[in-house]
């Protein structure tokens, strides 16, 4: 795959490393210092975005012009920015996820299926998310997606801790009468997110414009046509 990489920070570096290790090519990188780098550029197989909300306007212009597949893991978007990402699915295949790990996808499924047994029995649910001290947004994108899996209103509290070099810990607590249930996911390396995003990019590269979910890519069968990513896909499953 020929990939345009948005963001060259902690995630951008590991996406590049994993992409090149699996035979893909980063044909263009964009960071804050290269505003406008996408203008007039031809289509790629995929855009992978781990940057900041400020990069969105130039990325959307590029997608509108080229129809390139868009895999976005950036968090901290406003509701308006999130709507713009949804709208671009008219032009490109788009997959947005606040977390590209297999483990969080499984925890999300568990919550969708089983959390009603606890919340309907009166449990109070509180999420605690812990990240490295350089993380810019709070609450984390993962905490938001886990909350959405539990409840459509905002009666689930989210508590954010920042410190050291923690890649990401999410703890979902259900406090009931005389019992507590806690589900914990801990990412011990950012490689898991990079592999998930590359798997998604390979799967999306040949699809028609539309909105796709990470779960349908990893649980819905391996139909990606990109052999370099088969191995990543197996690691994720
Ligand atoms: N969905 C997932 O699975 C995961 C999502 N993330 C998310 O990915 C994002 C990036 O994380 P991380 O790599 O740790 O952050 P870093 O701060 O290390 O890197 C961010 C990168 O984005 C660039 N950037 C920021 N704003 C702009 C802009 N306006 N235009 C162009 N480039 C910009 C920065 O450029 P410069 O250095 O020039 O400022 C930098 O290269 C965060 O939102 C984070 O929450 C992280 C891990 C997993
Ligand atoms: O910024 C990070 O580091 C991470 N961000 C994502 C989030 O906001 O949930 C995913 C992961 O937890 C790491």
Image (cartoon, rainbow, N blue to C red):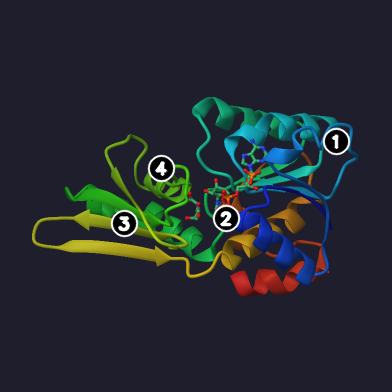
Q: At which x and y percent is residue 159? A: 30, 47
Give the structural element (helix, strand or loop) at label 1: helix
- Residue 185: x and y in percent read 40, 64
Q: Earlier in the sequence, mark 4 or mark 2?
A: 4
Q: Residue at x 73, y 35 (%)?
A: 59
Asked if the residue at tag 1 contacts the one at tag 4, i.e. Cβ–Cβ closer than 8 Å, the answer is: no
**Which residue has dot 3 on it?**
172
Do the CB atoms of the residues marked 2 and 3 lie less than 8 Å apart?
A: no
Which of marks 2 and 1 precedes in the sequence? 1
Q: Quadrant of the C terminus?
A: bottom right
Q: CA distance from mark 4 to mark 1?
A: 33 Å
Q: Image check: 28 left or right of 237?
A: right
- Estimate the spatial distance between the alpha carbons at disc 4 and disc 3, rounded to whole Å: 16 Å
User: Mark 4, residues whose alpha carbon is within 10 Å: few (<14), some, or many (≥20)?
Assistant: some
Secondary structure, mark 2, is: helix
Residue occupying image coordinates x 83% and y 50%: 45
Look at the image and tell me whether residue 141 can be seen: yes
Find out whether the residues at labels 4 and 2 contact each other: C-beta distance under 8 Å.
no
Most distant residue in the top direction? 80
Mark-to-mark CA distance, 2 and 3: 20 Å
Near mark 2 (Cα within 10 A), the count class, few <14, some 14-19 or many ≥20, is some
């Amino acid at each position: 795959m020929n990939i345009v990489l948005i963001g060259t920070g902690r995630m951008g570096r590991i996406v590049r490393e994993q992409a090149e290790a699996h035979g893909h090519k980063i044909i263009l990188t964009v960071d804050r210092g290269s505003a406008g780098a996408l203008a007039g550029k031809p289509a790629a197989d995929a855009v992978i975005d781990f940057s900041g909300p400020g990069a969105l306007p130039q990325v959307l212009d590029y997608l509108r012009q080229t129809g390139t597949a868009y895999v976005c893991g950036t968090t901290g978007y406003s509701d308006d920015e999130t709507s713009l990402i949804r709208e671009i699915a008219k032009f490109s295949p788009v997959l947005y996820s606040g977390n590209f790990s297999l483990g969080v996808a499984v925890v999300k499924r568990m919550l969708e299926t089983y959390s009603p047994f606890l919340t309907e029995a009166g449990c109070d649910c509180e999420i605690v998310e812990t990240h490295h001290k350089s993380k810019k947004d709070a609450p984390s994108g993962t905490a938001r997606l886990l909350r959405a899996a539990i409840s459509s209103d905002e009666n689930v509290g989210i508590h954010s801790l920042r410190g050291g070099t923690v890649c990401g810990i999410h703890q979902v607590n259900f406090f009931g009468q005389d019992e507590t249930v806690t589900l914990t996911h801990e990412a011990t390396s950012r490689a898991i997110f990079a592999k998930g995003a590359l798997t998604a990019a390979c799967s999306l590269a040949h699809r028609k414009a539309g909105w796709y979910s990470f779960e349908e890519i990893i649980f819905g069968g391996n139909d990606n046509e990109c052999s370099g990513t088969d191995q990543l896909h197996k690691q994720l499953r």
